Amino acid sequence: MAEMLPSLMVPVSSWLRSTPHRYWLEHQGLRLLDFSKASRLEGGFGPLDGQGRLTPDAAPDTTLTARATHVYAIAAMRGLPGCMPLAEHGVRSLLGPLRDAEHGGWFAGLTDGRPAASQTRKQNYLHAFVALAASSASVAGVPGAEILLELATSIWETHFWSEEEGVFRESFAEDWSDEEDYRGANSNMHSVEACMALADVTGDPVWRYRALRVVECFIHMLARDAAYGVREHYDRSWTYHPDYHRDQPTDDLRPYGMTPGHFVEWSHLLLKLEAALLREDGAAPEWLLTDSTALFESGMAAGWDRNGKGGLLYTVDNDLVPVVENRPHWCQAEALTAAAALLKRTGHARYEAWYRTIWDYIDLHMIDRRDGGWIQELDANNRPSEVVYPGKADVYHAWQSTLTPLLPLSPSFATAVRELF
């Protein structure tokens, strides 16, 4: 590895300083990249089944395409063969059939070569990933990425950003009418990641300050007032809806209750934002570290090993009673990323212990050494399950968890890789 160690706070005995562990992370990342290459199809990227084959009904999915573009653009900058053509395919797809050439923005996906009625609504969640993909592809020098970046930032800024509220709006009809009466923590969380990347790539600090405003709203105001439980579902008047999707507890984006995996995901995003502000401005709010630490503690207390089987479960209700006890892979990935970030930031041994514990769980239960990739979901007894997440559609969360321990907290992924290679 050529990367510099991320922080002098990391103890000499840490896995983060261990050459064998860093090689192990590299190996796991390469396995994930190779496994996911099969997700390419005409018009974008689609979902894989448990054996790494495109599902029978696979069709271009915009979120999967944007995530794959982001991942393979960064991998290409690291000199990994086969990755640049996939990033190029992603950019072409996002500039082509997945994009609404009439109204602007991006459809959710395609069915038989065109968006179905259910795929035409413009969602902030996927637009955040398009912006992230465009930023990473731009840094990697992917042809067309600069055009994609300009289109993505313009749409995102014009239609989704609410300057008055300091958050991103959720969704609109195809023609940008009919704004949804919803303010969601999930899409705004991913918007924070994209905003930090855009600030690094464009050099415009306004994106970084927007990330801070989103964090102030959802975490420093709302979550802090709820003992650092991240409440997900609000309407446009900021009324909390605790029963939202009570009848859909296994929804993959807006499940009923609270998601401990999001507590810990917000935790490491706050530390990355703190590092970015310190790097660029020389100052950052002290509460970013305080809130990050509290989010990690509340998330692990709410979701980890609730039945003695290890792992971070999917959802709890507002009283922290488990609702869906299945263990999604992304929850484990975000938990270990948060543990690594807190270890870099503080040097505290408890985060080293968590980092090792979470990786041990992933290694023994989720890394699929027979069929490849990671098992995307386990049930409460650590058996493969597809209740929430069928197949092995996602490379983004797992792959980033193998890369983030090797990088500093700031700048964002693509910019950090460019600076280190």
Image (cartoon, rainbow, N blue to C red):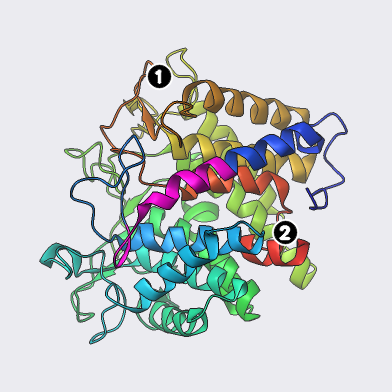
381, above or below 410, in the image: above
Question: Who is closer to the viewer here, 97 or 212?
Answer: 97
- Asked if residue 222 lies in the magenta stretch, the reply is no
The answer to whether residue 214 of the structure is visible from this angle is: no
- Which kind of residue does numbered mark 2 sit on? Ala
User: In the image, is 170 to the left or to the right of 230?
Assistant: left
Residue under the point 66% across and 42% down: 26
Give the residues in magenta.
30-45
Question: Who is closer to the viewer here, 46 or 401?
Answer: 46
Residue 349 on image: x %, y %: 77, 28
Residue 334 on image: x %, y %: 53, 41
User: In the image, is 117 to the left or to the right of 12?
Assistant: left
Residue under the point 17% across and 71% down: 114
Crowding around mark 1 (Cα neighbors within 10 Å: few <14, some 14 to 19, many 20+) is some
Q: Mark 1, mark 2: which one is toward the viewer?
A: 1
Q: Which residue is mark 1?
A: 382
Residue 157: quarter of image: bottom left
Which numbered marker is on residue 95? none
Residue extending furthest toward the front: 81
**Which secondary structure lies at badge 1?**
loop
Q: Earlier in the sequence, mark 1 or mark 2?
A: 2
Residue under the point 42% across and 14% down: 307
- Which kind of residue does numbered mark 1 sit on? Asn
Residue 294: quarter of image: top right
